[in-house]
């Protein structure tokens, strides 16, 4: 009886210490997350995970670090491994809290980041989950600009499939889901309205017009996006994509 009481007291004393340590680790990780210092952020987020392994918001932050770290890694295998880690953490987050929009969005983002490292069949099959995850995110948080952006990218990608990929998609889906550049434009414009300073929205809107051969509308948007200041870790990658499109149509 005495041993049980002592154990109970020790547990009560330990709980506040663990909570305090978790908070401190999260705060330190957040400082590096805001600076896009992915490896330093993980240095604090991963120990925090051991204290609260089912904290959905933390799992989303870990997924984000792995996804954003991919361009910095050397070698295809390392990049793919980071992408797979991002997807695993994102799925854990969605399972831990199915009402958290960012968790579903993280799943869609991770699947998109993995696209260059997967086969055409895998990517086409993953497109279902990308769309459903992004739709869940917009339903849970209609003001989440990036969730609308992902829906725009989904429509953009499916509407502009080449012949080989289109044939494969039709073999998998039977009939392709409805997708159009017009829908992509609608979602990109919605994302811009919600967060106009996020340059990826403007550049992808411009790229969509370019795919439609509406160059008079595409060129000003691409130039505008390229002139915007970099604010996020993957902005350089986005600008490279935008510049390539601009060079091709100018």
Image (cartoon, grey):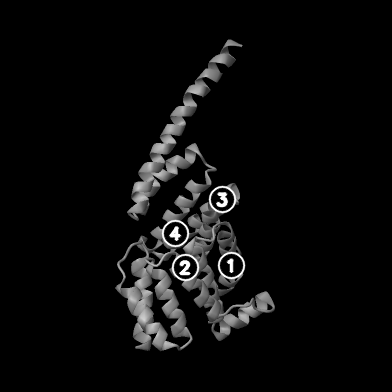
Q: Secondary structure at mark 4?
A: helix
Would residue 27 be found to the left or right of residue 152 on screen? left
Q: Position of residue 183 (x, y in %)?
A: 55, 77
Q: Which residue is mark 1?
A: 131
For residue 222, above or below residue 11: below
Q: Which residue is mark 3?
A: 92
Does the residue at mark 2 contact the one at mark 1 (Cβ under 8 Å)? no
Q: Position of residue 130 (x, y in %)?
A: 57, 65
Q: Position of residue 120 (x, y in %)?
A: 55, 74
Q: Position of residue 180 (x, y in %)?
A: 57, 80
For residue 23, above or below residue 148: above
Q: Marks 2 and 3, how far apart in space? A: 26 Å
Instruction: Decide which of 15, 99 is in the foreground and name it.
Output: 99
Which label was assigned to residue 102?
none
Q: Which residue is mark 4?
A: 67
Q: Marks 2 and 1, how far apart in space? A: 16 Å
Residue 47's quadrant in the figure? Answer: top left
- Quadrant for the C terminus, please: bottom left
* Residue shown at 34% from the left, 84% from the top: 247
Residue 26's quadrant in the figure? Answer: top left
Of callouts 2 and 3, the N-terminal one: 3
Q: Nearer the viewer, mark 2 or mark 1?
A: 2
* Residue shown at 51% from the left, 39% from the top: 52
- Disc 4 crowd rating (10 Å Cα; few below 14, some 14-19, many 20+) is many
């Amino acid at each position: 009886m005495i041993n049980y009481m002592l154990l109970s007291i020790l547990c009560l004393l330990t709980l506040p210490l663990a909570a305090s340590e978790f908070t401190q680790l999260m705060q330190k990780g957040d400082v590096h997350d805001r600076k896009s210092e992915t490896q330093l952020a993980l240095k604090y987020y991963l120990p925090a995970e051991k204290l609260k392994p089912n904290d959905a918001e933390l799992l989303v932050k870990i997924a984000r670090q792995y996804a954003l770290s991919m361009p910095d890694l050397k070698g295809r295998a390392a990049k793919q491994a980071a992408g797979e880690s991002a997807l695993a953490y994102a799925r854990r987050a969605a399972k831990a809290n199915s009402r958290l929009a960012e968790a579903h969005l993280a799943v869609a983002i991770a699947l998109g980041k993995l696209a260059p490292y997967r086969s055409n069949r895998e990517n086409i099959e993953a497109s279902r989950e990308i769309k459903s995850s992004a739709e869940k995110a917009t339903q849970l948080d209609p003001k989440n600009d990036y969730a609308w952006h992902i829906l725009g990218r989904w429509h953009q990608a499916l509407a502009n499939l080449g012949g080989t990929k289109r044939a494969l998609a039709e073999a998998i889906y039977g009939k392709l889901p409805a997708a159009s550049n017009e829908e992509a434009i609608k979602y990109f414009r919605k994302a811009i309205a919600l967060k106009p300073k996020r340059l990826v929205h403007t550049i992808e809107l411009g790229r969509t017009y370019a795919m439609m051969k509406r160059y008079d509308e595409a060129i000003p948007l691409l130039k505008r996006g390229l002139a915007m200041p970099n604010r996020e870790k993957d902005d350089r990658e986005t600008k490279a994509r935008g510049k390539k499109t601009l060079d091709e149509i100018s």
